[in-house]
Image: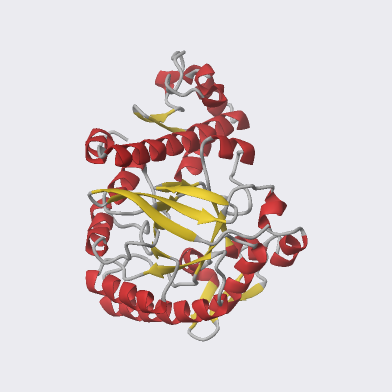
Amino acid sequence: MALKKFSFNVLKKDNYARLGKINTHKGIVDTPAFMPVGTQATVKGSFLRDIEETGSQIILCNTYHLMVRPGVYRIKKAGGLHKFMNSKLPILTDSGGFQIMSLSKLNKIDRKKGAIFNSHIDGKKFILSPEESIKIQKKLDSDIIMVLDECPKKTLDYNLIYNSVNLSTYWAERSKKAFGKNKHKGLFGIVQGGLFNDLRLKSLEELKKIGFDGYAVGGLAVGESQNEMFKVLDGLKDHLPIKKPRYLMGVGTPSDILGAVKRGIDMFDCVMPTRSGRTGLAFTWNGRVNIRNAKYKNDNKPLDNSVEKFDLKKYSKNYLNHLFNTNEMLGSMLLTLNNINFYQELMYEIRRNIKKGSFLKFYKKYANKL
């Protein structure tokens, strides 16, 4: 059977908010879309069949972590990442650029060689160049591949960010060359530039000259305020290519997502729903619930009466409070599932309201509530 060509279509716009479809040979992704994070070939605390049932259409895995363990050869020998983790969904792999920042104490950057890591597991040396990152992602058989970039920490040091943009552009050129011609997979460039609008536009224009299948906005969710993040997106929204998907990396809260969709973003990922689920924070249409709170000890109502899937409303806040306060893993599993399900319900309602032309009304109703 012939593989489908990677493509993206904008179906409708509501001001800057966009309703679209990404076509991959593993399936269609309706946008705006949220990607659950499966860093190490698993969405923590969840079965993939349940992730699929929430309405998730694509998941994210991580090049650096899979390179360190179990190792690329082992996954390739198993038939690729989809078969290894038993996933029917399309997979986007991050390039390892974020780990250059988050594991900065364990690596050093060389312009030509890339990032030289000492493994956070056993100290083993790894060199992740732009070419090696692309090579790994191809062996993993990712559907959407990210270029290697440098994701700097939040700083107001203009010269540092300027040099970082130049490095990321150089690595993007090398990544594109290493990717070669492949109509069946998507290659995304990553816009850097910190909080400086002129550097963001410089990064974007240089990436557009190289040419990519999609454009991500990186270097956010690194400690800036929501207003600072939205200011960056406001500076880019009239300049990002109209016919290519736009991906805001590592974001975020429900209100972050609503505000970013309002500014033309199509794709999101974040560990928040799963990490929060493991620590007792639930997302619902009525706002957030810290289930460890003592006030829920005698509350026999469900987290959200409107949730029909997975029998989640059969579990009372009283019972969930008990599970967390006795460190029972079922509590983490139930809240993780609740949160991913809520995020996908949110994305569905965002898409539905863009289609109806009522997104702004929906945004105003929930932006400060969720």
Give the left or right position of residue 305, taking residue 235 as reference.
right
Q: Quadrant of the N terminus?
A: bottom right
Q: Is residue 57 visible?
A: yes
On the rendered image, what quadrant is the C terminus found in?
Answer: top left
Q: Is 317 rendered above or below residue 153?
A: above
Q: Residue furthest bottom?
A: 112
| Residue 212: quarter of image | bottom left
In the image, residue 22 sits, relative to residue 74, either above or below, namely above
In depth, the one of 281 and 253 nearer the eye is 253
- On the rendered structure, is 173 left or right of 69? left
- Provide residue 337's location: percent of width, then percent of height: 54, 34
In this view, the residue in front, 274 or 232, is 232
| Residue at far front of view | 1
Residue drawn at the location 30% of the way across and 51% of the way down = 260
Residue 351: give x, y in percent of width and height: 36, 41
Total number of numbered labels? 0
Q: Residue at x 38, y 66 (%)?
A: 153
| Color style of the picture | secondary structure
Q: Residue at x 54, y 28 (%)?
A: 324
- Image location (x, y in percent) of residue 259: 28, 47
Q: Judge from the rendering whether residue 246 lies leftward or rightward of residue 199; answer left or right.
A: right
Residue 129 visible in rendering? no
Identify the residue at horizontal 23%, vertical 69% (top origin). 197
**Drawn side of residue 164 relative to residue 110, left or right:** left
Q: Position of residue 308 (x, y in %)?
A: 49, 22
